[in-house]
Image (cartoon, rainbow, N blue to C red):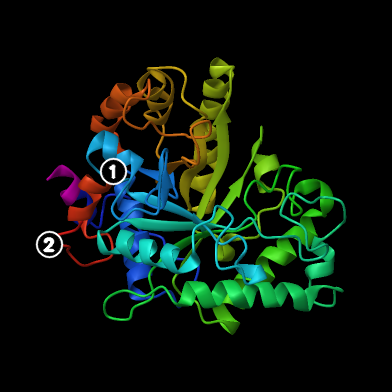
Amino acid sequence: MIILAMLTSTKVMGQLSAPSDAQATNETRELYNSMQRLTDAGIMFGHHDDTAYGVGWCMEQGKSDVKFVTGSYPAVYGWDLAKIEKDSLRDINGIPFYWQKDLVREAYDRGGINTFCWHMDNPVTGKDAWDTTTVTIKELLPGGAQHQTYVTYLDKAAKHLAAMKGHQGEPIPVLFRPFHELTGGWFWWGAKLSTPEEFKSLWQFTINYLRVNKRLHNLLIVFSVADFDAESDFMLRYPGNEYVDFIGFDNYCYKDVKQYVSNLDKRLTLLEAIAAKTKKLTCLAETGYEQIPQSDWWTKELLPVLSKHKLSYVMAWRNGRHDHYYVPYPGQVSEGDFRKFFKSSKMLFQNRVTPLAVYGKYITAFK
């Protein structure tokens, strides 16, 4: 009841910010308003490719490692557009795009939130997203040698996103997270391969093209960096408030857990200061500890840091293999601790989000 009151109140955060797209669909506006209000209620938990596959299973209807352990789906579902640009039938992780579209619809139908990143192949070399052998971004801008190739890539992604519809034909809102980890040097769009102005120009062209040329008004835009140690680092390539709805970063835990906790706390503090100026929602767009070897990592390391900050959502990376997973499965050493994390009043999973009608309509039942 407390969460419901927060969601329905128009005074929880003062004046709500409108989406950066002035023509955003009704459901998209409702979602953005709901997510602003919910920051006072808790942090939504997400998982990449959650219902597509997990440890020991793949493409089995209704399954989810998060649900196996907690009894609930996550509130946020991460997906990838990678390989749509090459007319592949499957995404970068092997999910058929038709199946991905169905899973997006299922998440929406249960009141969940979908977010897409895009490990886009390098349009200049034709190699994967990790190909940093050539300067790329300036070739993709209007007048660049590969501008038309890039536009073709956008057309294919836009067609896929436009095909995601609800029961009444309404476009399903999507948190679109292009060029993620942009402050790093491992992707072709990384900081070492373009000037800040070139990057901002590509971002602005991309969002304008999707909104104006492709008429996609169901996108909430996520600006997500990698490492940063100062506000100036974060803002150097920021494309402007009219092209962003969420600000966040990716931060993974490795063997030095104390360093992870320290960095996470410092960066979340910086992010909150930036959000106060930009009036954007904040997120921890990717995180996790591969194989989660520490049995109490969720409640001893992650939860105490998250509890100190206001965030819209936090998303753990995928459960791809027995040696590559970021949420526990039944029998995994942190399974019990993850259930405690799930029960925390700070965390919101699907079971707590569904009754809140984040799209402006109540859901009476879901699978």
Nearer-N-terminus badge (2/1): 1
Q: In this orientation, which residue lies closer to the viewer: 302 or 308?
A: 302
Quadrant of the image containing the N terminus: top left
**Residue at the disc numbered 1:** 349
Q: Main secondary structure of the magenta part?
A: helix
Q: Position of residue 297 (x, y in %)?
A: 42, 20
Q: Position of residue 275 (x, y in %)?
A: 50, 46
Binning the other alpha carbons within 10 Å of mark 2 as few (below 14), some (14 to 19) or many (20 upward) gives few
Q: Is residue 2 magenta?
A: yes
Binning the other alpha carbons within 10 Å of mark 1 as few (below 14), some (14 to 19) or many (20 upward) gives many
Q: Residue at x 75, y 59 (%)?
A: 199
The reply to whether residue 103 is in sight is: yes
Q: Residue at x 32, y 50 (%)?
A: 13
Q: Is residue 17 above or below residue 12?
A: below
Looking at the rendering, which quadrant does residue 9 occupy?
bottom left
Quadrant of the image containing the C terminus: bottom left
Q: In this orientation, which residue lies closer to the viewer: 276 or 27?
A: 27
Query: In the structure shown, which secondary structural element does the residue marked by tag 1 occupy?
Result: loop
Q: Which residues are magenta?
A: 1-5
Amino acid carrying label 2: it is Thr
**Residue at the disc numbered 2:** 364
Separation of marks 2 and 1 at Cα, in angstroms: 17 Å
Left or right of residue 42: residue 207 = right
Left or right of residue 157: residue 42 = left
Q: What is the number of the mark on residue 191?
A: none
